[in-house]
């Protein structure tokens, strides 16, 4: 298993944890009596909330880009296997230059 932060599993886990933290913080911050804490505590609390929210959104952006990259790599591999193949192109040129086949179809 890849232990790097560059793996999709890790940033999805980080995204889920920070999203859960945002949900819990929003729920706890909306409870009655929460505003009785000092101004500095409230600023720090909501600052951490928005920091977790930004981390979550960044993880979503990473995941979207990774999925798009995998799709493009799959498209490229498919192209290389079909149209990008030298054998396929040689056969295609031969079929286009063959006058018997082109006159038989028209």
Image: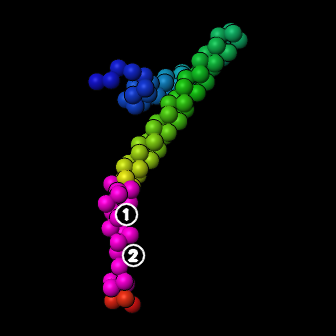
* Main secondary-structure element of the magenta-colored stretch: helix
Q: Position of residue 100 (x, y in %)?
A: 33, 85
Query: To which residue does mark 1 refer?
Result: 89
* 4 w.r.t. 100: above or below: above
Q: Who is closer to the viewer here, 82 or 61?
A: 82
> Which residue is found at the position 63% from the left and 20% from the top?
46
Label 2, label 1: how many angstroms apart (C-alpha)? 10 Å
Q: Position of residue 42 (x, y in %)?
A: 65, 15
Residue 13 appears in view: no
Looking at the rendering, which quadrant does residue 43 occupy? top right
Q: Position of residue 27 (x, y in %)?
A: 53, 26
Q: Who is closer to the viewer here, 9 or 2?
A: 2
Tell me the quarter of the image containing the N terminus: top left
Q: Marks 2 and 1: CB-CB under 8 Å?
A: no
In the image, the segment drawn in magenta is: 81-102
User: Was residue 87 drawn as part of the magenta stretch in this picture?
Assistant: yes
> Which residue is found at the position 64% from the left and 13% from the top?
44
Mark 2 or mark 1, earlier in chain: 1
């Amino acid at each position: 298993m890849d232990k790097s932060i560059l793996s999709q599993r890790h940033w999805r886990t980080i995204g889920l944890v920070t999203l859960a933290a945002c949900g819990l913080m929003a729920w706890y911050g909306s409870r009655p009596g929460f505003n009785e804490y000092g101004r500095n505590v409230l600023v720090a609390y909501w600052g951490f909330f928005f920091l977790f929210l930004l981390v979550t959104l960044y993880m979503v952006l990473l995941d979207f880009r990774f999925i798009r990259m995998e799709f493009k790599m799959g498209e490229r591999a498919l192209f290389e296997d079909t149209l990008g193949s030298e054998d396929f192109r040689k056969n295609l040129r031969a079929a286009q230059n063959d006058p018997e086949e082109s006159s038989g179809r028209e």
